[in-house]
Image: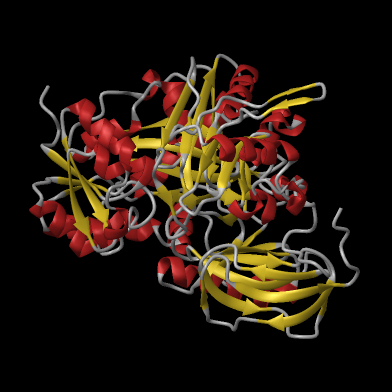
């Protein structure tokens, strides 16, 4: 069978770009990576058959023209960026490229949450009670951006006193991410689960669903762990949700892969949320339980080929779970992190799949989404899949920057997760991080040993082994470009500053940022803009009070007080662009912290 296309342009980055490139390779299709200037030399460019530079991933006309000039006859947008953009679909049509996704008209309809709600109602699909008037909807409610997706532009409001601030924050975030400030209101269903249905529909009107996924483990409306099938969803409910998703697809003559998202209420009722008209980050768990290559089907459908499958051919076997490994500090408000990936080790073994977007030597910044890899496992039962997930997470090493691996391991071990059925608010209600205040004695000893010996360029020195009264410093250690050492110990990356090597007493534990005398110089944890200042010089603040809000990667990130005290200096202003490490405020402790 001849390939569906000669060349496919890949207009995305990271792990999804690699996923598309590998699907093209399997089908005998040449891949052309469209690479932003600040991504040159990255993993997508290294893996593709050819690459061409584009000024940005956000200019539809330039992406299409560049792809066509490079010899492509189709364009795959991946997820994020312009993956659900009617403008990109139209630009591809205008330049003679096949767009790997639905039509511009379908994207325009589904991209507006209010229009998608109306479509669902006409198709007989229940929607969450909502509308344009908050008082009519009632509290608690959810403020949602009318356009876009990915959890951005959303705020939960408990009562009317919180509404104005929530609307402004959601509208600002929506404008930055999607170019529009419009919002709508939906009733917030407490205790609900997020369940979504994967569909495929060809250009000839044939469609099927591939079962459902549970994506309820979320923080700030961003998914963390997903699984398929959803715990507690039986054959009858699966059929109802699948039929509803296909009715929505039929209503807009949808072509390609898509995902209909639903809320499953505690009383068993369910409601349509939105349709994601693209490949989903979490598509691998569906592939693992169905053995259907969704990206390959996307390419075949875009070429006009009919689906070879019928609904009866779709069988769910076993259970699959995906954990998203992010460059973020889950123990300090899920702040994005950055740095050089000094070394990585991904787990291997039966039932383990890793879709990684970085390799050793890559640099992770904060301009783009911080997803490093997706660790996926498959087992005969959910219990077996959880056991595999725990073992696989223990085998991951990412040396050089802070990741959310401590959070993922804690979730995998949590009895509530093990029982199944956690709701969308569970993680934020229960996550209580236990962040350390500095490098442990083990990490300092490993760093000192490495510095003393500098055992060549290879950072792998084995693992920590702790015995009675004896510590052998053979943890993985690597030196960063700035001279600091990074040690993998306790399942996390620990940075030991160059100035502290050989001086373990400098690592006396104290609240983060505290200096001698109880003065903390609060530094920017990432590059960004100061969106709001919540304090002024002389203000008294409580521990964990929000001092200011930074905007980075089109999302808002609060900076908290490490302890109670008084603001003695404000070193920034609203609207100011700051770099990681810039001092923003100085805080004097109400009671000098114990430095022992």
Q: Is residue 498 left or right of residue 351?
A: right
Along the viewing direction, whichever of 447 and 569 lies nearer the viewer: 447
Along the viewing direction, whichever of 253 and 326 lies nearer the viewer: 326
Seen as rendered, the residue at the extreme right is 591
Q: Quadrant of residue 423?
A: top right
* Residue 76 is at least partly visible in this image: yes
The percent coordinates of residue 329 (x first, y second) are: 62, 51
The percent coordinates of residue 562 (x first, y second) are: 77, 63
Please, is residue 573 above or below residue 7 in the view? below
Q: Is residue 340 left or right of residue 200?
A: right
Please, is residue 512 above or below residue 98 in the view? below
Q: Residue at x 78, y 64 (%)?
A: 544
Q: Quadrant of residue 426?
A: top right
Q: Quadrant of residue 586?
A: bottom right
Number of on-image labels: 0
The percent coordinates of residue 174 (x first, y second) are: 49, 68
Please, is residue 260 above or below residue 107 in the view? above
Q: Is residue 356 left or right of residue 558?
A: left
Quarter placement of the N terminus: top left
Q: Is residue 79 left or right of residue 488?
A: left
Q: Residue at x 62, y 58 (%)?
A: 129
**Coloring scheme of the render?**
secondary structure
Along the viewing direction, whichever of 93 and 24 lies nearer the viewer: 24
* Residue 124 is at least partly visible in this image: no
Q: Residue at x 21, y 40 (%)?
A: 302
The percent coordinates of residue 181 (x first, y second) are: 48, 74
């Amino acid at each position: 069978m001849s390939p569906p296309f000669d060349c496919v342009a890949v207009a995305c980055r990271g792990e999804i770009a690699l996923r598309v490139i590998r699907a093209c390779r399997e089908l005998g299709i040449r891949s052309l990576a469209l690479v932003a200037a600040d991504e040159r030399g990255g993993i997508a460019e290294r893996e593709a058959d050819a690459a061409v530079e584009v000024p940005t991933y956000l200019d539809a006309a330039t992406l299409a023209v560049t792809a066509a000039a490079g010899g492509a006859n189709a364009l795959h947008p991946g997820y994020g960026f312009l993956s659900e953009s009617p403008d990109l679909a139209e630009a591809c049509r205008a330049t003679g490229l096949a767009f790997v996704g639905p039509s511009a008209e379908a994207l325009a309809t589904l991209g507006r949450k209010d229009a998608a709600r109306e479509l669902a109602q006409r198709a007989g699909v229940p929607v969450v009670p909502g509308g344009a008037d908050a008082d009519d909807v009632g509290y608690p409610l959810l403020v949602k951006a009318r356009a876009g997706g990915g959890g951005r532009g959303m705020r939960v409001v408990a009562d009317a006193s919180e509404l104005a601030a929530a609307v402004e924050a959601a509208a600002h975030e929506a404008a930055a991410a999607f170019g529009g400030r419009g919002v709508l209101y939906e009733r917030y269903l407490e205790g609900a689960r997020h369940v979504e249905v994967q569909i495929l529909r060809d250009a000839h009107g044939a469609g099927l669903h591939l079962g459902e996924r549970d994506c309820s483990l979320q923080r700030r409306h961003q998914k963390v762990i997903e699984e398929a099938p959803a715990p507690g969803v039986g054959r009858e409910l699966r059929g109802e949700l699948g039929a509803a998703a296909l009715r929505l697809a039929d209503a807009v003559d949808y072509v390609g892969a898509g995902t209909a998202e639903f809320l499953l209420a505690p009383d068993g009722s369910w409601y349509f949320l939105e349709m994601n008209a693209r490949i989903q980050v979490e598509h691998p768990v569906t592939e693992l339980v169905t053995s259907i290559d969704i990206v390959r089907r996307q390419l075949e459908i875009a070429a006009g080929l009919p689906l070879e499958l019928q609904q009866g051919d779709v069988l769910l076997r076993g259970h699959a779970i995906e954990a998203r490994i992010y460059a973020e500090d889950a123990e300090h408000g899920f702040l994005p992190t950055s740095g050089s990936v000094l070394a990585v080790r991904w787990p291997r073994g039966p039932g383990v799949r890793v879709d990684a977007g970085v390799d050793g030597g890559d640099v992770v910044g904060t301009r783009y989404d911080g997803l490093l890899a997706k660790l996926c496992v498959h087992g005969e039962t959910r219990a077996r899949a959880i056991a595999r997930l725990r073992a696989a997470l223990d085998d991951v090493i990412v040396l050089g920057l802070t990741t959310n691996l401590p959070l993922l391991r804690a979730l995998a071990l949590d009895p509530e997760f093990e029982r199944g059925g956690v709701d969308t608010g569970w993680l934020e209600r229960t996550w209580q991080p236990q962040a350390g205040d500095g490098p442990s004695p083990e990490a300092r000893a490993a760093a000192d040993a490495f510095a003393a010996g500098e055992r060549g360029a290879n950072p792998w020195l084995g693992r920590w082994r702790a015995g009675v009264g004896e510590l052998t410093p053979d943890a993985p250690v690597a030196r960063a470009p700035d001279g600091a050492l990074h040690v993998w110990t306790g399942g996390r990356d620990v940075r030991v500053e160059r100035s502290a090597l050989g001086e373990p007493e400098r690592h006396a534990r104290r609240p983060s940022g505290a200096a001698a005398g109880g003065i903390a110089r609060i530094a920017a944890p990432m590059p960004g803009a100061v969106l709001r200042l919540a304090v002024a010089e002389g203000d008294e603040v409580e521990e964990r009070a929000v001092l200011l809000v930074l905007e980075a990667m089109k999302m808002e990130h609060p900076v908290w007080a490490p302890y109670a005290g008084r603001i003695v200096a404000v070193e920034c202003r609203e609207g100011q662009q700051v770099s990681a490490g810039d001092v923003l405020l100085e805080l004097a402790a109400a009671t000098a912290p114990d430095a022992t």
